[in-house]
Amino acid sequence: MTMRLNVEHRTHYTYNAPVPYGLQQVRLRPKSRPGQLVETWDIEVLGGQVEVAFEDEHANSVDLVSFTPGQSEIEIICRGTVTTEDRAGVVGPQGGFVPLWLFQRSTDLTKPGDGTAALVAATTRQDDDLSTLHALSALVLSRIPYSTDQAAPDLTAEDVITLGHGVCQDHAHVFITAARAMGFPARYVSGYLMMNDRVDQDASHAWAEVHVPSLGWVGFDVSNGISPDARYIRVATGLDYRGAAPISGLRYGLAGEAMSVSLQVQQQ
Amino acid sequence: MLGKTAGGLFWMFRYLERAENTARMIDAGLRISLTRSSAAESEWTAILSSTGLKSAYEAAHGAPDGPKIIDFLLRDPGNPGSVMAGIETARTNARTVRTALTREVWEAVNECYMVLKKLLAQPIADRDLPRVLQVIRQRTAIVRGASHGSMVRNDIYNFCRIGTFFERADNTARILDQKYYILLPSVRLVGSASDNVQWDTILRATSTTRAYQTLHEGETDPRAIAQFLILDGRLPRSLAFCYGKIGENLGFIAQEYDTRHPCHALAETLCHKFKAHDMNAIFDYGLHEFISDFLADSARLGRQIEIDYRFTE
Amino acid sequence: MCRLDGMAKQTQFFDEMTGRGNGPRAPYEDYCAWFKNEDTARLLAKSEEAEALFRLIGVTFNVYGDPDATERLIPFDLVPRIMAAREWAKVAKGIEQRVRALNAFLHDIYHRQEIIRAGRLPAEMIARNDAFLPQMIGMTPPGDIYTHIVGTDLVRTGDDEFYVLEDNARTPSGVSYMLENRETMLHMFPELFSKVKVQPVSQYPRSLRRSLSACAPNACEGRPTLAVLTPGIHNSAYYEHAFIADQMSAELVEGHDLRVVDGRVAMRTTRGYKPIDVLYRRVDDDFLDPLTFNPDSMLGVPGIMDVYRAGGVTIANAPGTGIADDKAIYSYMPDIVEFYTGEKAILQNVPTHRCSDSEALKYVLDNLADLVVKEVHGSGGYGMLVGPAASKKEIAAFRAKLEANPGNYIAQPTLALSTVPILTEAGLAPRHVDLRPFVLVSPDRIEITPGGLTRVALTEGSLVVNSSQGGGTKDTWVLEE
């Protein structure tokens, strides 16, 4: 089954004072790959300009955007059309130069602790890796139900386990941390999901991928209890949220920031 | 050239000039306290005021006292405006802009610092003071000489010169600001005129006593002193001379870069004031007002140069 | 009248002037002939003159954690270390081979990691290496050069025995001392240089400029603009940063002078922002770019790694080259050289025990009094144990550290480092030395300045030559053929 998805994604930042200098790393360009064909994709920046575009170590397309000096707002608009295919979450073998052992490294956000150990202990080992990982995914969701209460971008996996609920990013972090503790290379994925019942989506989405010897990378969307299908557009990957964040930046001065996102994903 | 470097050069030479000027003022104070002890306290106060360090001194030491003031201005580690602190700041700036300096200039600054650091490590005994002040003047003169003799006449040199003249003009203006009232025609004192200790302070603090006497054949007259320090283009410490040089040096940079900035127009306006005015016009306008205006204009020009040549972000 | 008598016959160490105590070796013949007619008092006076000169020029370094001595001189000894052309040729050939291998190794580690696939290097050596930067994976720097500037530390133990002690592929320092030492010697003993023909070193700044320019990125238009990035005047090596920038006519910049402008890294000049093509940076990887590495860094340039990956700037040395300075990697250097060059290593490695290995650890613990133990990531002579020179108490304390974290240490036999005489009040006296030649790597050539920096342990019997530990330096002469 294939789908043709139209995306319009606007991220609008406003500041309570002019920003003298600022930069943002934008990881918002999906790439064509088996199961995902990017027909068109454009990024427009209002109140800033793209300085350089490059590929990072995970082969994500990154745009470095600078603020127009003295601006107090900046908007990044992505528009595009992507044809997707349901491959039951299977992404395939590791490409590029990143050695698989790198995906077993813990990061600040995915440092395993007692909470992770308890999750791993409670996961029923199945005959095949895939079933084990699905069991882990189900366990994470049952112990950490989806809730947007107290959502914060800097929660670590252990924080989330303690808190007992979370959003897609938190689920992905907990799942990655546990999968690594079980010996699997695992990574964070940011992207888009077309929710069936609506055009206006709340926010961009996040899930996890685990490398299993027989299949290569396989996706797990813990929050939705499934592997990604044709409704998913994969945009960027990294060891955790920080490595794959759609936008991460730095600015001079003391201006406070407010952000609003509007996202439409619809089938054509 | 980096904007930071231009700023570093400008400040390096300002600090050197300031340290030298402070030494000249200490010399003036010392001379007055030796020869006219009754006037010493008020003259020391005037000197402190014109260095801008009066309140810092009072906070630390209270009432004006010759030896304390000398130590405060010369080397007190608690005084960031001391001669020693100025030399140290100049040298730190020199290290920052090391690549823009010739080896001669750098070595002259470094040696100046090393010599004075040793010389000023302890409070100076009265009998050693004249020699110490002489060493300060000599060491700063060597830096000036080294820059004259070894630096290419490009933007680097011009920023150094602008720093020097900026500080020097400021210094002359601040001394005049302290003493303007004794130069006013209305308060000319009949009879005692040629023996006015305050005129002496002004001329000594700017090290212009001899030059004044040579050019005015010994006749001391407040109006002539004002004329001399403000408008006389022959005197390297007069406001007119310093601003002539600042205008000239800014002009060279504009020529080298083929670009004029707002600071150029501002400098021209300021230079014009000296050309267009004679002493009568200044007295009519008000000497105090003229000097106050000058200090404000000069500060504005300093900020504009800093912006135009990107000393900082 | 100076005499060589002070150099009593000694056989334990190889002395570069007198061999094993048999009078001047060939490279020193002319020097010794001159020296015999000199007067010790005059030379000691010259020595003071040299110190005054260094202080005036400002050839100083800052010692971390020593607020009272913010600017210190590295002691300079005026007896040169002299090598014959033929001795040098072999050393230079060995260094060139090693540096070539290092570059190939770095390229490989950040690409396919063939050496690991081939089973010649365990993956943990990279995975556990803090200097490995994932952000460099897949990145090929302009000209495919990773280590533009290398300072290989060598020690000599005999007439024809040289060992590599460290590779220093990250940011070797000391080149300013090599140049200033020579200038000082020329200034003090002009007559000596007319008697002894010494290969010059003064071409180094020009070579550095040429070598870095040859690695300019594609974005460069016209003549490459170079700059030296320093952490600032409080850095221990600030003098050297200013010196290098001055000598190669490049701007000396700090992080706050730089910005990303129109896709390039540009410096704020009096005429606006000007793009930099090649940045010789003396700022550590972690502080280089707050957007990619340590977000709290004030020393770096936000976005420089992005511009770098996009091909807009050359960073020398490349970020992530420090993996080659790791002392555990060092122990694999003979394999690394062989893997990438297909030749046996010309220069020997010091046999190295990796304490992460339990058998090696046992051996090291049993023989602490005879070994030199170093931290895997250490440098500057900090945190090391020189067994034969250490007290029982020091050894016991070090044993505890070693047992607590064996993976953090390697151990090597104590080498019989060669000596070169220094001038003391009592005349000549032998002191241990090492040698750091400086290597420049560009796509078309590897250039090694004849000689390098000789570091000397000024305390009798000491084997630690680091300036931070009280070592001094000497001028190093390679004679003309």
Image: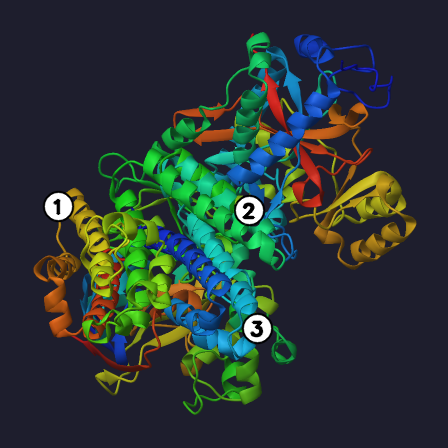
Which residue is pictured at 68% across the width and 30% down the height? C434
Colour scheme of the rendered structure: rainbow
Q: Is residue C402 left or right of residue A178?
A: right
Q: Which residue is mark 3?
A: A178
Residue A27 found in image quarter: bottom left
Q: Please, is residue B313 above or below residue C247 in the view?
A: below
Tell me if label 1 and label 2 are in contact, CB under 8 Å. no
Res. B114 mark: 2
Which residue is pictured at 47% across the width and 78% down the height? A154
The spot of residue B78 in percent (x, y) is: 55, 68
**Type of residue at label 1?**
Asp
The spot of residue C415 in percent (x, y) is: 78, 31
Mark 1–mark 2 distance (CA, rounded to whole Å)? 40 Å
**Type of residue at label 2?**
Met
Q: Is label 3 in a helix, a strand or a loop?
A: helix
Q: Is residue C221 left or right of residue B28?
A: left
Chain of the residue displaying label 1: B
Chain of the residue displaying label 3: A
Q: Is residue A160 left or right of residue A148?
A: right
- Whether residue A97 can be seen here: no
Q: Which residue is mark 1?
A: B258
Viewer-side residue, C241 vs A118: C241
Earlier in the chain: of badge 1 and badge 2, it is 2
Which residue is pictured at 58% across the width and 15% down the height? C89
Mark 3–mark 2 distance (CA, rounded to whole Å)? 63 Å
Query: Is disc 2 on the same chain as disc 3?
Result: no
Query: Is disc 2 on the same chain as disc 1?
Result: yes
Viewport quadrant of the C terminus of chain C: top right
Q: Residues within 10 Å of mark 3 (few under 14, many from 20)?
A: many
Name the mark nearer the viewer: 3 or 1.
Answer: 1
The spot of residue A101 in percent (x, y) is: 55, 56
